Image (cartoon, helix red, strand yellow):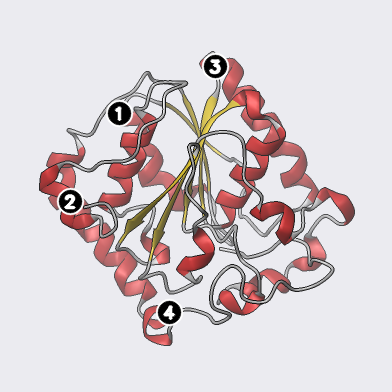
Amino acid sequence: MAYFLQEPAASRGEAGGRVAPPPARLYLTEPARGLAGLAALPLAAGWLSSAPRGDRHGVLVLPGLLASDTSTALLRRYLSLLGYNVRGWQLGRNVGPTDKVLAELPKALADLARRAGGAVSIIGWSLGGIYARELARKQPDLARQVITLGSPFQLTDPRQSRADGSYRRRSHLHATGHQVPTREEIARPIHVPSTAVYSRQDGIVSWQTCIAPESGLHENVEVRCGHLGFGVDPATLWVIADRLATPAGARHRFRPPLVLRNLFPGNR
């Protein structure tokens, strides 16, 4: 759930959205809304089981700040049921870009690509999405696509995140120097297909920081969950399944089924 990695030489002001965190009402209700998404999963099981299925390629799933693979267990279980070769990051609790994280994530991507027999889709939740984009930037031949879930890769000011304090308190654990990209570097486009899933109901990071201009390689998809709910939100799970089912080398915009369009405010 974090928000920039290395401080840039100068602030860019409001270029990435308003310089303010999400409203307090959204922040304070995050836990309850996350539980509501979890409670909705059994009700959505029928239509989620009918989601598009792809070619069973490898999928690497990365958690957010202060989270571990436990937070993505239901997401990974769902993707496994759809037939994908799924791996968590297997690095314990995500406390930020430590030397170990920066050394082990490229190995994890290469290992999964080798075992799965081809390029890997990388899914990252919050800070995990920033990791995912940087992995794809550095190893594009191994990255089939990137899907970010509430990841503030366009953050321009720490005030746009309510998790900045948690990130800074662990900065003594983080790698230093040129190993860690600046905010400007993180915001640059990546050269593999990418989908940014975001929510205007996000209570942790400003939603404007989680999207980028759309292009032939990048698309933004809006859902309605809170930040803590992305991994269990039925609409988000459908988007992920739909994007993973896209054939390698192909690219088409997300279009939800007619019966589900109300779940996607920006894609009706």
| 184 shown above or below 80 | below
Which residue is depicted at the point 59% across and 56% down? 127
The label shown at residue 118 is 3
Query: In front of the other: label 2 or label 1?
Result: 2
The label shown at residue 27 is 4
Q: Would you name the residue on which mark 2 appears?
A: 261
Residue 221 locus on image (x, y percent): 37, 51
Q: What amino acid is labelled 4 in the image?
A: Tyr
Residue 118 locus on image (x, y percent): 54, 16
Query: Of label 4 and label 1, which has the lower sequence position?
Result: 4
Q: Would you name the residue on which mark 1 appears?
A: 82
Q: Nearer the viewer, residue 185 or 117?
A: 185
Q: Which of 18 and 66 is in front in this view?
A: 18
| 187 shown above or below 200 | above
- Report how far apart the C-alphas of labels 4 and 3 lie in the structure: 40 Å
Contact flag, marks 1 and 3 (Cβ < 8 Å): no
Residue 124 locus on image (x, y percent): 52, 47
Q: What amino acid is labelled 2 in the image?
A: Arg
* Crowd tier of the residue under label 4, counting other residues whose Cα lies within 10 Å: few below 14, some 14–19, many 20 or above: some
Query: Of label 2 and label 3, which has the lower sequence position?
Result: 3
Which SS class for mark 1? loop
Q: In the image, is 177 to the left or to the right of 36?
A: right
Contact flag, marks 4 and 3 (Cβ < 8 Å): no
Which residue is depicted at the point 54% across and 52% down? 68
Q: What amino acid is labelled 1 in the image?
A: Leu
Most distant residue in the right direction: 177
Which SS class for mark 4? helix
